[in-house]
Image (tube, rainbow, N blue to C red):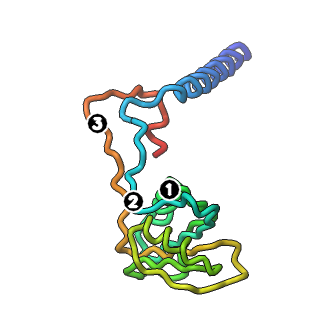
């Protein structure tokens, strides 16, 4: 019984080491369907404005909106310091709120998200420049679809982590 237990433990350690090494090696090469593509440009990025700290709130109620908008803004150089749900859902249009009297920063965020609705609501208790309240009408960039016919190794867990 003791030898079987030792053999099982040894097998578990070898499998764990193999998975760890395989995962580390697979990170060096992208999956076949993963091409490094620049995000499609919108009208504006944060270039030239310095650091623009942004809070993104999902006020539309659709799943993952705040995370998708966070990725969208970060790809364009904005510093998203918080994202999550708003206090209430059901908002139709996206609103960008200027919090520290930097209308050019709020306008840049609005253009990057494809909206024109910018309001000034100063709040010195917040440590950010802009608040975004996403309405259910905001549509993120279309994700790149996997190309068919390319096989991904069964052991590569990155395909499940999207």
Q: How many marks?
A: 3
Mark 2 touches mark 1? (CB < 8 Å):
yes
Picture quadrant of residue 83: bottom right
The residue positioned 38% from the left and 74% from the top of the image is 136
Q: Say which of 13 and 142 sits in front.
A: 142
Picture quadrant of residue 52: bottom right
- Quarter of the figure that contains the N terminus: top right
Relative to 44, say whether 120 is above or below: below
Between label 2 and label 3, give the one nearer the viewer: 2
Callout 1: helix, strand or loop? loop
Relative to 79, say whether 5 is above or below: above
Relative to residue 10, is residue 146 drawn left or right? left
Between label 1 and label 3, give the one nearer the viewer: 1
Task: Give the residue number, with chain letter if any, for mark 2.
Answer: 42
| Label whose residue precedes the other's in the sequence (2 or 3) | 2
Q: Give the label on residue 76, or none.
A: 1
Callout 3: helix, strand or loop? loop
| Label whose residue precedes the other's in the sequence (1 or 3) | 1
In 3D space, how far apart are the residues under numbered discs 2 and 3 (Cα atoms)?
25 Å
Picture quadrant of residue 128: bottom right
Q: Say which of 160 and 47 sits in front.
A: 47
The residue positioned 54% from the left and 73% from the top of the image is 104
Measured as percent of width and height from the top left, residue 15 is found at 60, 22
Q: Is residue 85 visible?
A: no
Q: Residue furthest top?
A: 3
Task: Give the residue number, with chain letter if any, for mark 3.
Answer: 147
Measured as percent of width and height from the top left, residue 118 is found at 48, 81
Mark 1 touches mark 3? (CB < 8 Å):
no
Q: Is residue 6 visible?
A: yes
In 3D space, how far apart are the residues under numbered discs 2 and 1 (Cα atoms)?
9 Å
């Amino acid at each position: 019984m003791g030898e079987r237990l030792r053999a099982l433990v040894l097998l578990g350690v070898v499998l764990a080491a193999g998975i760890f090494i395989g995962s580390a090696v697979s990170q060096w090469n992208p999956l076949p369907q993963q091409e490094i593509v620049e995000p499609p440009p919108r009208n504006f990025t944060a270039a030239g404005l310095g650091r623009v700290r942004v809070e993104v709130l999902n006020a539309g109620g659709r799943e993952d909106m705040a995370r998708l908008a966070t990725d969208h803004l970060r790809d364009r150089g904005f510093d998203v310091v918080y994202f999550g749900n708003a206090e209430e859902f059901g908002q139709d249009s996206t609103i960008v709120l200027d919090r520290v009297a930097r209308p050019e920063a709020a306008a840049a965020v609005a253009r990057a998200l494809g909206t024109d609705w910018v309001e000034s609501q100063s709040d010195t208790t917040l440590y950010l420049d802009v608040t975004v309240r996403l309405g259910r009408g905001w549509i993120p960039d279309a994700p790149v679809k996997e190309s068919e016919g390319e096989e991904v190794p069964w052991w590569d867990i990155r395909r499940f982590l999207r």
